[in-house]
Amino acid sequence: MKPVVVITGASAGIGAELARVFAANGHAVALVARRASRLDTLAAEIAAKKYAPPLVLPLDLTRPDAGARLAEALAARGLEPQYVVNNAGFGLVGNAADLDRDEQLAMIDLNMRALTDLSLRFTDSLARHGGGLLNVASVAGVMPGPGSAVYYAGKAFVLSLTEALHRELEPRGIRVTCLCPGPVETEFQARAGVAERVPPWPLGVSARQVAEAAYRGLMRGRRVVVPGLGPKLLMALVPRLVPHGILLNRLEARQMKRRRPAGPAL
C-alpha cells in the first residue's frame, strides 16, 4: 500500500493551503471535501506545478459512514494514510438556543465525531509509515465562547483529545500535532455568519502562514502549534490573566458585534 496524506476540508482556506504545502514538500495528497469542483481545480493547480497529481475524494464527512467510505476509497486505489489532516469544520455565531439545533448537531458531527473517527481509524498505517496526525482546533479551544458556544466547546474537545493522543501515540512513532490558529481570512467567516472578513491586528495570520507553520510543527513532532505572535499571546495569557466573568462578557460582546445582520423579512 502506497502512503498518502489525507486532508479534509481541502476545498478552500487553510485546508487548500495545507494541500499545497504538503504537495510542495513531496507528499502525495488525497483531497477530501464535499465540493468536487473546488477539489478538481486545486488538484489541477497542484499537478500543473509538476507535483504528484492529487487524488480527489468528494465526501460528506457528516455522514455516519464517512470514515468507512474514505478507507474503502483509499484501499481500492492501493493507498493508505501516512498523515491524516483533520481540517474540515465550520462554526456558527449566535446564541445556541436561537440557532438551528440540527445545524449545530451537524457541526458536532463534523468538528468532533468525524475528526475523532479519522484520528483513530488509521493509526496502524500511520505507524507503518512513520507518519502523523494533524488536528485543527483554534485559540478558541482555551476559553468559553458565549455567542458561539458549541463551536468553542468543540475546539476545546479537539485540543484536549489531540494533546492526549500526542502522548498515547508517541511510543508508536506517530507524530500528533494540534494546530490552533487565531482568526484567519477564509470562507469560514461567511459560513459562520460573521460580518467581519479581515481579522483585527495583531491576531490575523494568513492561511498560507498557518499551513506552513502547521507543516513545520508536525514534522518536528510538536504537540501544539499556534501561528503568529498575537494568537500565541492570546492563547497563553488571556485565559490565565483575565477574570472568567470579564472574559465571558467581552467574548459575548465581540461575537455579537461580529455577527452578520439578518436580511429583511420576505
Image (cartoon, rainbow, N blue to C red):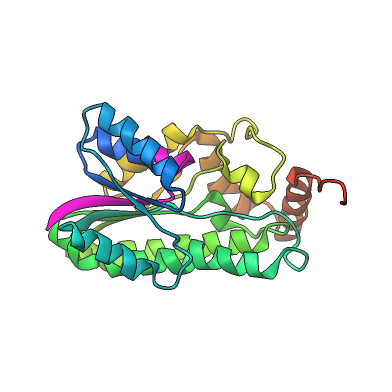
- Outermost residue toward the top? 49
Relative placement, left or right, of 245 versus 103 is right
Q: Which image quarter is the N terminus in?
A: bottom left
Relative placement, left or right, of 163 versus 239 is left
Residue at image point 32% right, 41% down: 215
As drawn, 50 above or below 56: above
Residue at image point 74% right, 57% down: 94
160 in the magenta segment: no
Relative placement, left or right, of 18 versus 203 is left
Measured as percent of width and height from the top left, residue 82 is found at 21, 54
Measured as percent of width and height from the top left, residue 137 is found at 48, 54
Residue at image point 15% right, 58% down: 78
Residue at image point 23% right, 59% down: 74
15 in the magenta segment: yes
- Outermost residue toward the right? 265
Quadrant hosting residue 162:
bottom left
Q: How many marks?
A: 0
Asked whether residue 213 is in view, the answer is no
Measured as percent of width and height from the top left, residue 15 is found at 42, 44
- Outermost residue toward the bottom? 64
Asked whether residue 45 is in view, the answer is yes
Q: Which residues are magenta?
A: 1-17
Front in this rendered view, residue 222 or 81: 81
